[in-house]
Image (cartoon, rainbow, N blue to C red):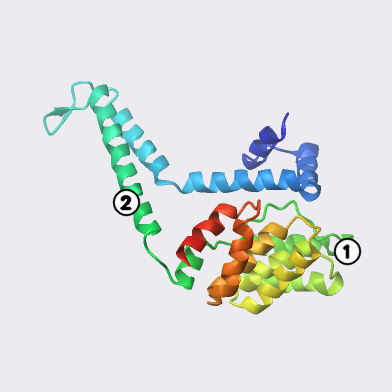
Amino acid sequence: MDYKETIEMYLNGELKGEALKSFLDHLDNDAFYMKEFTIRKEIEDALTETDVIDLKNNLEKIHLSFGDTKSRKISKFEFNTSSFRWLLVAATLTLVLVSSAILFYINNESYSSGELYSMYYKPYDSYGGVRSGKINTDDIFINAQIKYDKNDFENALILFQQILDIDKTSIASYFYAGVCYIETQEFEKASESFQFIINHNDNLFVEQAEWYLALSYLNSNQKEIARKHFEAIANSQSYYKEKATEILEQL
């Protein structure tokens, strides 16, 4: 079984027992594996949010509702396979045209720092495989992630800080604490957390820390500092390269 198939099985909730443990260990220790997982997770999130899927499902429901009555008509118009195909084509074309118009508007409209931040920021998705790094703080870390996943960022932050009081080398705790600081509007502390990770360098959260650090500066309206960080990301091989380039076009 290759890594892509394993990632798909994890996202579908199909990994159990030793297979699940092995997968999570890979995410902990293999930067390439984690990057592939992150990319696939982003794609899944995007697909679940797209209106195209809703359109397709709705049209299929309409089609099925007429499947057993060939003679049924709507406003004297027979809804047969041919008309359904034309409806699908017309709806798809409309969606493409509307999407193109929106993209044109976005590409030709400048935004404030706060607006750009709102467009591109979302809390980092926890996947539950990362551990604190110390046996005596793993239970605290698990509880912190549970609260984090429930968007209880204030209480999650308290637990991540408890871990850092015990173990100041817990990179994962620094990172999730940084996101919690963003969510609680403490952007200076968020920047300090992300900068620590970047300075450490030898860890799996560097790209994410660079991205969220740039967003922190953007939201606090420090546009020139934010620009420098986005430029560094755009000129790298970071997973966030394209998003950073898009932001730079609007700054």
Disc 2 is placed on an element classified as: helix
Determine the residue positioned at 57% across, 48% down. 42
Residue 200, above or below 10: below
Q: To which residue does mark 2 refer?
A: 101
Determine the residue positioned at 37% across, 37% down. 56
* Circle 2 or circle 1, nearest the eye: 2
Q: Is residue 75 left or right of residue 185?
A: left
Amino acid tagged 1: Asn
Q: To which residue does mark 1 refer?
A: 136
Amino acid tagged 2: Ala
Give coordinates of residue 74: x percent, y percent.
Answer: 16, 32
Distance from Cα at disc 2 to Cα at disc 1: 55 Å
Give coordinates of residue 41: x percent, y percent.
Answer: 60, 46
Residue 168, above or below 51: below
Q: Residues within 10 Å of mark 2 (few under 14, many from 20)?
A: few
Give coordinates of residue 84: x percent, y percent.
Answer: 27, 28
Determine the residue positioned at 29% across, 24% down. 67
Q: Is residue 224 left or right of residue 147?
A: left
Q: Residue furthest right?
A: 135
